[in-house]
Image (cartoon, coloured by chain):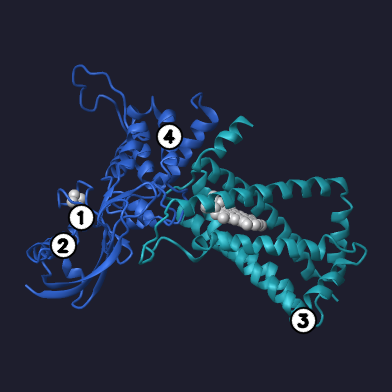
Amino acid sequence: MSKIELTLKIWRQAKSDAPGRLQTYASGPISTDMSFLEMLDVLNERLTREGEEPVAFDHDCREGICGMCGAVVNGHPHGPEKETTLCQLHMRHFKDGDTLVIEPFRAKAYKIEKDLVVDRSSLDKMIISGGFVSVNTGGAPDANGIPIPQKNAEEAMDAAACIGCGACVAACPNASAMLFVAAKVSHLALLPQGQPEQARRALDMVREMDALGFGNCSNERECEAACPKGISIRNIARLNREFLKAAIFSDED
Amino acid sequence: MGLIGSLYRSSVGKKSIMAASGLLLSLFLLTHMLGNSVSFLGRNAFNTYAERLHSLGVLVYIFEIGLLTLFLIHIITGIILYLENLQARPARYSVNTSEGGRSWGSRTMPYTGVIILIFIIVHLMNFHFTDKSVPVADLVRELLSSPSLAFFYIFSLVALALHLSHGFWSLFQSIGFNHEKYNPLLMKGALVFSILMGTVFILIPVLTLVSRSFLL
Ligand code: HEM
Ligand code: FES
């Protein structure tokens, strides 16, 4: 087990409306087998012992599936490794003596609660606005009762891989939430169950996204490259298609 | 106006307007490029081409109004998008890096746009709001033999090529066309299109500067 020592520059902000700043810490010896969040745990134990306020950060499952964790490391949401959440990022990817600048996800539609903890409930609001299907309760439907082409099932599954971490917004130069919205609209537009509310969903989710203050998509492709689940911008093209189809041809407004 | 209004009220709608105006402007650029390449056939051919074009009379007028409208739509929508995008992240990051998605073209869209705008104004002053009795070949030689103006043209046309290298792919994505099979082709196509446009347009100031016989 090898050890590395790092210089950490971490964003410290006492509460939402307080000013924040980067504060420098020496990491002390860090095992390369640790995850990034475990490295922060080690730092926090020391800060607590020294009577300092520990660094607040988001986390839950720590296995890359819940979408709770996330911070920007040296400019990269979830750190520099491709298709890896912050909790699954291991310290072996860093070198002894590295300096890591750790900042919260930033966007007008995200609110910093404290240090690296970010309120991303704006993502939930977009789901509430249309990211669902309405079904009647009753007997469980037969599996495979509705035929779905294999390719559609696979593409829907790829879009549904979104864990809602919001790194796409953090990575976008315009703080646009298009990849997030596109993943949900695609997921449901590709499946028969999503058809009845298809036009409504595309219009409502885009309207909610705009109202929440997210930016416009300039097709920079940063979101796709930052997404820990590798969700493709082909989904954004599908969202654009669904939206324009609904705006131009449907009766919905 | 109901549809246009409702498109303007949404981000995706505005981008589709950007894409449609960008596509039409690109098509105009294509015909302009083909027209300009007549200059490579010599002074007489080029002058004749210009005279024939002007003899279309009212059609030219209608076309110019249409083009002006397209430019205004594209520019105003572009400025709105740019300002909205700035507002969407009020607090900046201390470290700014790319994830590898952005290209030179994509990250400079608003700046290359402004360069093109300034260029269009200068270009219209040079060739449109001027003495129309001078044969166009003479006008080109007279103006572009000035190195400073020729370099301004070359610089602006490089900016135009950069704008198109992203724009001509981006417009398809904006209107919802991105197919696994064709997207790589489309990306290369946009690059080829922008390089071709840039090269043909830039050849004119370059040839005027270096060739003793061009358009004479
Ligand atoms: C011959 C001239 C021009 C052509 C052919 C052209 C073409 C295009 C195309 C095809 C796009 C891509 C649209 C999309 O992403 O869907 C675009 C985007 C853009 N253009 Fe132009 N353009 C021209 C002039 C201008 C001018 C004069 C300006 C501004 C002063 C401008 C500003 C922009 C901006 C800011 C974008 C990016 C919009 C965004 O993605 O947020 N363009 N242009
Ligand atoms: S903590 Fe659940 S994805 Fe990272």
Chain that the image shows in blue = A
Q: How far apart are marks 2 and 3 (CA)?
A: 66 Å
Residue B197 visible to an observer of this rendering: yes
Query: What is the number of the mark on residue A40?
Result: 2
Could you tell me if the residues under marks 2 and 1 are in contact, i.e. CB atoms within 8 Å?
yes
Kindly identify the amino acid type of the residue bearing the numbered disc 4: Ala
Looking at the image, residue B134 sits to the left or right of residue B196; the answer is right
Q: Quadrant of residue A142?
A: top left
Query: Is residue A114 left or right of B101 when viewed as pictured?
Result: left
User: What residue is rendered at 18% in x and 77% in y?
Assistant: A96
Residue A64 visible in rendering: no
Task: List the single residue furthest toward the right.
Answer: B133
Residue for badge 1: A57
Counting residues from the start of the chain, the first of labels 4 and 2 encountered is 2
Say whether mark 3 is within 8 Å of ligand 1: no
Label 4 resides on the chain identified as A
